[in-house]
Image (cartoon, rainbow, N blue to C red):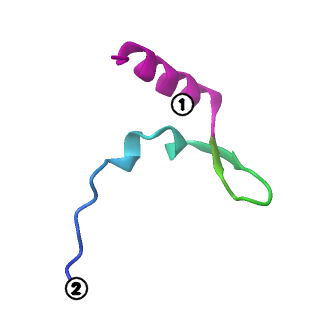
Amino acid sequence: MRRRKPVERQTTAPWANIERTKEGSSVSLPDEVMAMAAKEYVDENEK
């Protein structure tokens, strides 16, 4: 089986700087700086 190349670069994702994880689900929660950067990116790139 061939390995596929990832579609997205995860190094710039908001969860790259994980502040903590949610109890029970282990969902990664980014720090405030990364969350604001992600929001700004989305707001600037709305269609």
Residue 31 % position (x, y): 63, 34
Magenta run includes residue 43: yes
- Image height check: is 17 above or below 22? above
- Image height check: is 10 above or below 46? below
Q: Is residue 20 left or right of residue 41?
A: right
Q: Secondary structure at mark 1?
A: helix
Residue assigned mark 1: 34
Kind of residue at badge 2: Met
Main SS of residues in magenta: helix
The quadrant of the rendering that contains the C terminus is top left
| Number of numbered markers | 2
Kind of residue at badge 1: Met
Residue assigned mark 2: 1
Q: Which residues are magenta?
A: 30-47
Q: Is residue 3 left or right of residue 24?
A: left
For the point 50% across and 37% down, the residue is: 14
Instruction: Name the mark nearer the viewer: 1 or 2.
Output: 2
Answer with the quarter of the image where residue 42 lies. Answer: top left
The quadrant of the rendering that contains the N terminus is bottom left
Q: Which mark is residue 18?
A: none
